[in-house]
Image (spheres, helix red, strand yellow):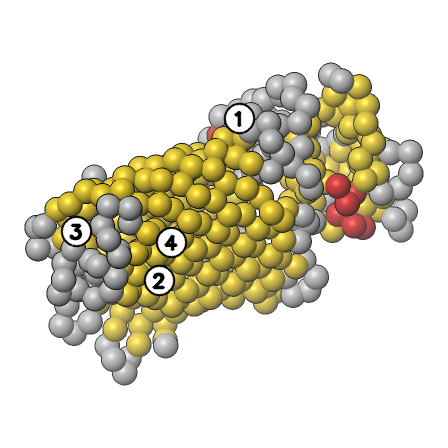
Amino acid sequence: MQGILLVAWRRRLHCPALTPSDSLYRSTGPWDLNLLTIVCLLTLLLISASANATRKTDVITLYNGDHVTGEIKSLLGGKMSLSTDAMGTINIEWKEIASVVSNYNYEVRLTDGQRFFGSLGPGSVPGTIALTDVFGERSLSWQEVVELRPVEDSFQDRFDIYVSANYSFTKASGVTQTEFRANLDYEDEDAINSMTSRLTLTDTDDETTSSSRITLSRKVYTNRKALYRNVLGGYETNDELGLDYRYTLGAGLGRFFIDNNSRNLTAGMALQVLQERSTGGDTQESVEAVLSGTYSAWRFDSPELDLDFDAQIYPSLTESGRVRADTNATLRWEMFSDLYWDLSIWGSYDNAAIDSEAGELDWGVTTGVGWEF
């Protein structure tokens, strides 16, 4: 495979305005190139609109005695992102930090799913923090803290955006593949709202085919530490499966089984309705169950390594014997500072496609290099 190019941009942003809360759980028409262009332009607009004044007064003390002053941007996956005047944005492993001092408010998420909002100070012993909120002060150890997010009032500061593009050309077969991806997360005090999308264009000597998928979800926190309510929807097209379009809308429940500084595992169940039309013009409506799972693992030792896997199975409740499935796996390996090698594999399956002449399975593999900044 020759001529492979992957360009990626990622921005980690902040949490919403302060709201007192003691133990709320935090979980987690056609889609075409014009719509993708609009998403990309919106992304650039958000970037340009985020020129807010910074406050680099947070003090981080390491176990070796060093002090670093800057602005805490986030803590996630065992790594704190700190913006400094002299060194730019640096990443510090959470296990290397002895104490944190900050005059600002944060959302703190623990391994058992509890969420707190308050200010931070040094704990009584190294490796702990003192969290002060409307209910008083509590001491938290490093091992308990999964995520730390500064509280922001600005609308655009609540977004987490990832955009990538991938191009590949195989000379022997004359096959060219272009792929675009966009992920958008927006979080408030009650829920996290997500959009993921993929557009794949495949050119051969004989024809041009495409597949696209956009999924929307809203995970609403509940008073049960490990549970969340989920509302989901989607749009999909796939020439290889003979699918002109498919719309879905559903709701269900999900649960976190693992949520710590190195791994994340969730599973969920839902019911959804769908309307679809084949490329031959046949249409139908049906109801199906949704069984889903996600797994993420990461390592910040050199070289940095990230693995994300998700899978969904859709057994139909109104069409006897019909089962659909979708899956995606992404591996990202840091080759140099902020320069990554990426491998992504995805697949779509339908054992009873409404276009009987189309195949049951479509899949793709893309690889390339990415840049994070």
Q: Position of residue 329 (x, y in %)?
A: 46, 61
Count residues near mark 3 (Cα–Cα under 10 Å), then give few for <14, some for 14-19, many for 20+.
Answer: many
State left or right for residue 319 relative to residue 17. Answer: left
Q: Are marks 1 and 3 in contact (CB under 8 Å)?
A: no
Distance, label 3 to label 2, CA atoms, is 17 Å
Instruction: Return the disc, 1 or 3, that comes first in the chain's sequence.
Output: 1
**Residue that appears at 44% across and 49% down:** 292
> Dot 2: what SS?
strand
Q: Position of residue 31 (x, y in %)?
A: 25, 45
Count residues near mark 2 (Cα–Cα under 10 Å), then give few for <14, some for 14-19, many for 20+.
Answer: some
Q: Position of residue 10 (x, y in %)?
A: 50, 47
The answer, for residue 165, to whether it is visible in the render is no
Instruction: Return the disc, 3 or 2, that comes first in the chain's sequence.
Output: 3
Q: Which residue is mark 3?
A: 244
Q: Which mark is residue 284?
A: none
Q: Which residue is mark 2?
A: 347
Distance, label 4 to label 3, CA atoms, is 21 Å
